[in-house]
Amino acid sequence: MSDTLGTPVSFCNQSLTRWEFRSHLLSGLRQRQQETMSHHSNGVSAMENGHKKDENNDVMKENNDVIIRDVPQALMPVVAGLISKRKSVPYWYLYDTRGSELFEEVVRTSKTYLNWQKEYSVLQSHSDDIVAKTTSPVILVELGSGASSKTRLVIEAMLKRHGTLTFVPVDVSKEHIEEVGQQLEQDYEGLTVEPFGGLYMEGIRHLSTRKESKVILFLGNSFSNVHIHEQVDMMKEVRAQLTAKDRFLLALDMNLDRESLLEAYGQQWVVFQKDNPIGRLNKDFDGDMDAAKFELVTDFIENPADGDTPSYVAGYWRSLAAQHVNFRKLGLNLDCQEGQKIFYNEGPNWSCKWTLHQIRRLAEKSGFAVEDYWTTEAEDYCVVCFAPVS
C-alpha cells in the first residue's frame, strides 16, 4: 500500500499498459478516473461478436446480461469485476473523496501501519548517500509526488551538494503539484520546480531527451501495488527511457513478519476497504448490498525468500451467509454463497514484501543493477538505487 494514495484520475483517450494504469490509480492521485480503457489499460472488457469479454478473468457475458447504457465509462471496470468469475472491484474504486479521507486518517493515527515513518527514517539517515550517486547538473523526478513531504529531505541534500536543482513532480493532479511546487520554490533558494501533469511514463518520456542526469523517485512502497505479474514490464519500460548516468530509486517494504503484517493491514482498514466502497457500489448502481453481511479478510501469502516472486498481502470481502444482492441500475442480481469472496484488487497482490534476492532478480530481469540500497535499522524497509545496464 502506498502512503500517498489518492482518488482516481482522469485518463481521457489514453492507451496505457495495465501496470501504468493500476500504479497511477494507486499513488497520490486526486481526481476522478474517466479513462476510456483500451484493452491494454487494465484488461477490462472489449466488445467482441456481441459479447463482453473480461480479459483478466476470461469470462464472456451476453451484452443484455447487464444494463450498461447509463453506466459512465469510468465505472465499466467496476461492472466487469462484478460480473467476472473472480469477483472484484478495482483498488482505485476505494478512493472517492471519503475513501481518501479515511485512508489518510489511518496513516496518520495507526500504531501498526508504519511505512511512512520507516521511509522517512531511511531518507533522513541516508539522503546524503543517495545524492552522492548523482552528478551535476541533475533533475530530480518524483512519480506520484503528491505533497512531496518526504522528498524535501532529498531536495535539501541535493541543494547542499549541487547548489541548484530542477525538481519535476509527476502527478495527474496538476493543480495540486503546482501549488506544492510554488511552496517548495519559496522554501528553497536555488530550486526550480517544473510540475508535470500526466501519467508516469508520459513524465519520464517527456524528460528523456534532457541532457542533465536524472534521478527518478518512486516512494511509498507504491511499486508493490503494481500487479505482481506486470512489475518487470514496468521496470523495462522505465529502463528504456533512461541513460547510463540516470538512476531509478524505489522504496520497498521488506517486512516479512506475518503477525505484524496482518495487524498492520487488518481491521483498522475495515471502514476504508469494506464499508465505504460497498456504500459507493450501492450509490453508483442503486444497490442493496449490506456491508454488515460481509467481513474484511486479510491474508499474507508467503513465497520462498530465495525465489523470484515476492510475498504479498492479499485482501477481500467474505460473505458471512448466503445472500442475494441486487444492483438495480445494472439489472444485475448476485447470489452470494456463504464464504463468497469479492476482492478489492485486480491482481493477487495488495502489497508486496521483498527480500534482497528478489530485488536483485527484479533488476536483472529488467535491465538494471542494484547499485546500492539503504534500510531501516531493523532492515524491514529499504530505498534501492537501480542503475541502468546495457
Image (cartoon, rainbow, N blue to C red):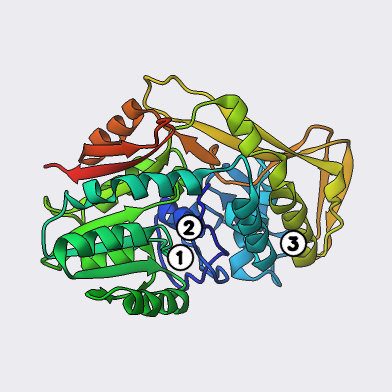
Where residue 340 sits, quadrant-wise, is: top right
Q: Secondary structure at mark 3?
A: helix
- Type of amino acid at the residue the image marks with label 2: Ser
Where residue 253 sits, quadrant-wise, is: top left
Sort mark 1 into few (<14), some (14-19) or many (20+) by Cα contacts within 10 Å.
many
Tag 1 residue: 146
Residue drawn 27% across the image and 52% down it: 238
Residue drawn 25% across the image and 73% down it: 191
* Drawn side of residue 337 relative to residue 96, left or right: right
Q: Secondary structure at mark 2?
A: loop
- What's the mark number on residue 280? 3
Q: Tell me if residue 57 comes above or below residue 25 in the rendering.
A: above
Q: Give the mark, 2 or 3, whose residue is nearer the N terminus.
A: 2
- Type of amino acid at the residue the image marks with label 3: Arg
Foreground mark, 1 or 2, reads 1
How far apart are the two marked residues, 2 and 3, measured between alpha carbons? 21 Å
Where residue 126 sits, quadrant-wise, is: top left
Residue 106, position as x, y percentages in the image:
65, 52
- Type of amino acid at the residue the image marks with label 1: Gly
Tag 2 residue: 27
How far apart are the two marked residues, 1 and 3, measured between alpha carbons? 24 Å
Residue 199, position as x, y percentages in the image:
39, 65
Residue 3, position as x, y percentages in the image:
51, 53
Q: Tell me if residue 138 comes above or below residue 355 in the rendering.
A: below
Quick one: 390 or 63, which is closer to the camera? 390
Does any portion of residue 311 appear in the rendered image?
A: yes
Quick one: 102 or 118, which is closer to the camera? 118
The answer to whether mark 1 and mark 2 are in CB contact below 8 A is: yes
Does any portion of residue 48 appear in the rendered image?
A: no
